[in-house]
Amino acid sequence: MLVSGSAGIGKTALVREIHKHLVRREQFETVPHKYFISGKFDQSQRNIPYSALTGAFRKLVRQILDKSETQIEQWRKKIMEAAGPCGQTIIQVVPEAEAIIGPQPELQELPPAESQNRFLLTLQKFIRIFYQPEHPLVIFLDDLQRADPATLKLTEQIVTDENIQSLFLIGAYCEDEVSKGHPLKLALDALQKHGTIINHISLSPLKLKDIEQLVTDTLPQFPVSIAELAFQKTGGNPFFVSQFLQTLFNTKDSDLTAKSLQAKCYHFPDNIKELMEWKLKKLPEETLQTLRLAACLGSPFDLNTLAVIDKKSASEIFEHLRPAIAEGFVEPAGDSEIPESLKHQTSNIKHQASNIKHQTSNIKHQTSNIKHQTSNIKHQTSSIKQNFCLCMTVSRKQFMR
């Protein structure tokens, strides 16, 4: 499955929804048996073969290490059976595997061509053990337009394997960057010539009616006419639209007329590149410095390594990154990325958020009761008026007599 579109169109967000669906389904299963892993091709690691693919399997091996000793032993046997005497090859690309299979003997020296063939064969066998009928595997590779030729070739070999089963491969790429002679285009053409079925979803910008519905559902205090301004300014790009509306939402001005909002957006950037630069300039200097160092490490990076480079504690680094996280420049991989000293604060925040939700629910319940009581009062008032009118009518009749 391929998902294509321009930058910010929502390719990654769409695939994440698939992941959420898989997670929700697993909650109702006694033994979760499917795996979803993802890797992203980074511009700074373009000269490192298999970086995104091996990064994805490193995450998968970490998942296995969280399992019981019995399950880890089962995986150890599978990996050793697949790797044979070439276990060191696996450890070279997936260092975490050593915690499962233990130290492995050094590899026998071979000529370059034979060594490369051994590497590819071992890596393919290693990958194959993870997609089986008892535990299907979904692999998501993002930004395929930046993929190195070695990864494209290995992916082609995996997809065209006659014994392939229980594997769902999803790739996303920015179609604006893939020309006719691009390596990705050539690889896809080769797959189609081989007879491989490639499903393709091409995402298009939001239409005006979509943005109107978005404004109505999420920002009811705004006039619906603001949707037309958002459409003109962003061209319907979902990421651009969300940033545009968020900027308006964060305004402190109580004047929410279309004319006032239009004036506020006069200096809003005209494209995504300018938008990101605009948002970066608004970050604190210590956050920008931390991001510069993180960029040198590539994606993903970990707090501990960044702390060593910047000669600060992991907690300090996390605090410096908070504004970048809030703006969406950095996305924590999970609670493991949060320093221990801050996990308690995070837990308190979650607890407070839960209390707020509970209080909000109580307020809604009380509001409902008030509405019900108000309705009763109106009903009783209506009855009193009717009785009063009836009394007046009777009194007049008696008076006339």
Image: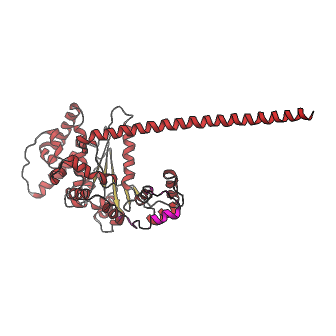
Name the side, left or right, on which 21 lies relative to 322: right
Residue 84 in the image, given as x and y percentages of width and height: 14, 42
Name the side, left or right, on which 72 lies relative to 330: left
Can you tell which quarter of the image residue 46 is in?
bottom left
Q: Quadrant of the C terminus?
A: top right
36 vs 329: above or below? above
Q: Which region shows up in magenta?
A: 249-272
Magenta-span inclusion, residue 349:
no
Magenta-span inclusion, residue 252:
yes
The one nearer the camera, 379 or 185, is 379
Look at the image and tell me whether residue 326 can be seen. yes
Residue 320 in the image, given as x and y percentages of width and height: 25, 52
85 vs 111: above or below? above
Name the side, left or right, on which 231 lies relative to 71: right
Residue 392 in the image, given as x and y percentages of width and height: 82, 35
**Which residue: 35% across, 39% down?**
350
